[in-house]
Amino acid sequence: MPKKEDEKGFVDVINGRYKPRGVFHIPEANQPIFNKDTGQLAGITNPRDMTYMHSYGGEAPFFENLSKGKLMATRCDNDKCESKNSVFMPFRIYCPDCLRKATVIDMTDIARNTAIIHSFIITHRSGAFNSLAIPIKFINIEFDTVVTILMSYLTVGEPEIGKRVIPIFRTKNPTYTITDLSFVLEGTSETELPEGFTF
Ligand SMILES: [Zn+2]
């Protein structure tokens, strides 16, 4: 059941510290588990409702920019690194080769102009708390100049290896999670995009 406002937990950062307000743990009555064959008690359910504070740390610029329709990657700019100029998407805070902090760059245009499907998998069964429409078309994506492969999901069209795809962003009511980024086949029109998404 959706929670009312007074049953939710909220967090702000004030003066560099987390300041929680509201409710973070909601108790709920447990239920017995009986063996229907013998009538004997076998155990209990243990409902636990808690709100977890997930800190994004150095990855925050990635999630914040999805809400603005921008795809941010990182690049190693260390002159002494053999992997200098490597662009990382998924966003890596540090270069894995030299362990220096990587530079945040805007790769929205690279994604728009060069993204292709590297591989894909279609799943009709999802894990708990899934929020995506089933079947989910997971796609692995290659971009020009990017040394890694990104996993995302295709919202419009059927996946095929080598097909060009275009990023779309949940810019209306963003969730600030990875599902704010999705892809559609090249040629998809604005009117076909799911609610809340823009190019
Ligand atoms: Zn490096």
Image (spheres, rainbow, N blue to C red):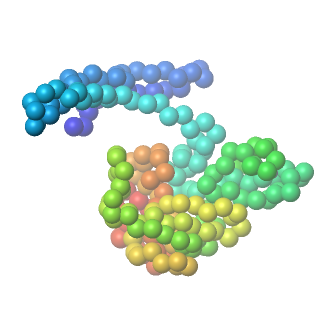
Residue most extreme to the right = 80
Task: Using the image, determine if residue 55 lies above or below residue 164.
Answer: above
Residue at 54 percent of width and 34 percent of height: 55
Where is residue 65 shown, x and y percent of the image? Answer: 55, 50
The quarter of the rendered structure image containing the N terminus is top left
Where is residue 156 shown, x and y percent of the image? Answer: 39, 71
| Relative depth, front residue between 135 and 73 | 135
Please count the marks in the image.
Answer: 0
Left or right of 173 on screen, residue 83 = right
Residue at 56 percent of width and 38 percent of height: 56
Residue most extreme to the front = 38
Query: Is residue 142 visible in this depiction of the protein?
Result: yes
Task: Using the image, determine if residue 191 lies above or below residue 92.
Answer: below
Task: Using the image, determine if residue 85 lies above or below residue 35.
Answer: below
Query: Is residue 112 visible in this depiction of the protein?
Result: no
Task: Using the image, determine if residue 138 lies above or below residue 76.
Answer: below
Residue at 61 percent of width and 36 percent of height: 57
Where is residue 144 shown, x and y percent of the image? Answer: 68, 70
Residue at 36 percent of width and 50 percent of height: 127
| Relative depth, front residue between 188 and 88 | 88
**Quarter of the image where one finds residue 155:** bottom left
Left or right of 91 on screen, residue 19 = left
Where is residue 52 shown, x and y percent of the image? Answer: 43, 31
**Quarter of the image where one finds residue 143:** bottom right
Left or right of 92 on screen, residue 179 = left
